[in-house]
Amino acid sequence: MTERITVNTHSSIRIEAEKILYIDPFRVENEPHDGDIVFITHSHFDHFSPEDIGKIARPGTVYVMPESMKQDAAGAGLKDIITMTPGETKIVGGIPVEAVPSYNTNKPMHPKKNGWLGYVITVHGVRIYIGGDMDATSEAAEVQCGIAMLPIGGTYTMNPEEAAALVNKMKPACVIPTHYGTLAGDPGDGEVFASLVDAGIRVEFKL
């Protein structure tokens, strides 16, 4: 399944499955206009970029985002909006989606009260967890998934050590680190993270 996943940069993810899925499109270089469903985790510019959404949108594109982002969506002129709250589950375009709270526990940038989200998206029978900007939360530790895509760059999110400790609790089959080497963290953070992940968990790099 991981061969169907690409990370453009930072936390900008594309999944080619039953439908073409994007999560937090950012710094998209071309204009494929092929997005069936676009997931937004929160409203910060490097995760909610109307300019980049315009590059992947096509007629009929559906947008999934936190309930708290309704006004952001309206301001960007987006239609076909599906909003979710933490803990909620929905079927979007035939794809099961679970909303997981995404927040900081020891930093001010992503407060829990904002209702921002990570998502567990099930495609081809595989549960893929995209964490959003987060620290190691109790909710994340309970997520059951085959593939986890988690931030490791520190400053705004977990650092490599914190992210590895969380992954070792979660025990997915595979983890793909994100959110490092560009706007946050260093390019070498991926190797630091991988060295701390338990041997039974496969680490794949997409950045």
Image (cartoon, rainbow, N blue to C red):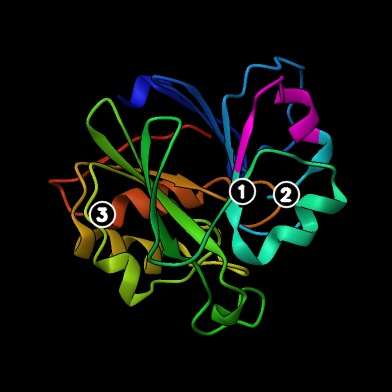
Of the two numbered discs 2 and 3 on the same chain, state the one appearing first in sequence: 2
The x, y position of residue 145, in whole percent, is 24, 48
SS at mark 1 in the image: loop
Q: Up-down: is 45 above or below 100?
A: above
The x, y position of residue 97, in whole percent, is 39, 46
Quadrant location of residue 160? Answer: bottom left
SS at mark 2 in the image: loop
Apparent side of residue 101 relative to residue 12 in the rendered image (left or right): left
Quadrant location of residue 43? Answer: bottom right
The x, y position of residue 68, in whole percent, is 66, 67
Separation (CA) of disc 1 from disc 2 = 6 Å
Examine the rendering and report whether any part of residue 41 can be seen.
no
Of the two numbered discs 1 and 2 on the same chain, state the one appearing first in sequence: 1
- The amino acid at mark 2 is Phe
- The amino acid at mark 1 is Ile
Q: Which residue is mark 3?
A: 197
Separation (CA) of disc 2 from disc 3 = 30 Å
Q: Which residue is mark 2?
A: 48
Q: Which residues are magenta?
A: 52-63
Magenta stretch holds residue 188: no
Q: Are marks 1 and 2 in contact (CB under 8 Å)?
A: yes
Separation (CA) of disc 1 from disc 3 = 27 Å
Q: Residue sitting at 71 percent across and 17 percent down?
A: 33
Q: Which residue is mark 1?
A: 40
Q: Up-down: is 93 above or below 87?
A: above
Of the two numbered discs 1 and 3 on the same chain, state the one appearing first in sequence: 1
How crowded is the residue under tag 2: few (<14 C-alpha within 10 Å), some, or many (20+)? many
- The amino acid at mark 3 is Val
